[in-house]
Image: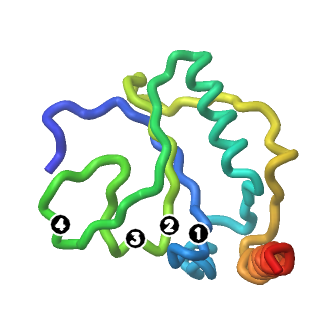
Amino acid sequence: MHPLEEEKINIFCMYALRPFAGSFPVDERNLRFGDYALVVTNPQQFIDRIASHLKSQSIKGRTGFVEYVDDEHTGEVGPFRKLKRFAYQSEWRLVCYDGSGEAQKFSIGSIRDISTIMLSNEINEKMEKIYFKKYNKALAADS
């Protein structure tokens, strides 16, 4: 059911790689979204930059992971809920409220220092190497 009056929101979506939440390896269906993937290597810094910009522009926004509900779900829905058949998308979202209802653009500056670009079809192999190298270092440090 749609609201009586359209919400004037903007949604920015990204795949959230969360190995312990079942989002790794990246489902092959996601690789159809483009030939390249932008991997944010410092998610907290990315979120902090977004929050700083939103605050400086007095834009009301919220970030978070999408909750995937059963396809037969009859309860409340919204910008952070989606049907379970889309769970392979493992989304993180930025939702900006009270906009014009039109597409919006804003700049948080360069993110070259907190991201890298790679071919989409190489993401699982590269992320596995990076993740397990980091994990093994953490285990060695604890020993």
Residue 20: % across, % down: 56, 75
Q: Which image quadrant for residue 85?
A: bottom left
> Circle 3: is it few (<14), some (14-19), or many (20+) Cα within 10 Å?
few
| Residues at circles 3 and 4 in contact by the CB criterion of under 8 Å | no
The answer to the question of whether label 2 and label 4 lie on touching residues, with beta carbons closer than 8 A, is no
Q: Answer whether labels 1 and 2 touch (C-beta < 8 Å).
A: yes
Percent x, y of residue 39: 74, 60
| Relative to 26, 64 lies left or right | left
The chosen color scheme is rainbow
- Badge 2 marks a residue whose secondary structure is loop
Q: Is residue 112 left or right of residue 89?
A: right
Q: Amino acid at mark 3?
A: Phe
Residue type at mark 1 is: Arg
Q: Is residue 29 visible?
A: yes
Mark 4 residue element: loop
Q: Earlier in the sequence, mark 4 or mark 1?
A: 1
Disc 1: which residue: 18
Q: Secondary structure at mark 3?
A: helix
Q: Which mark is residue 73?
A: 4
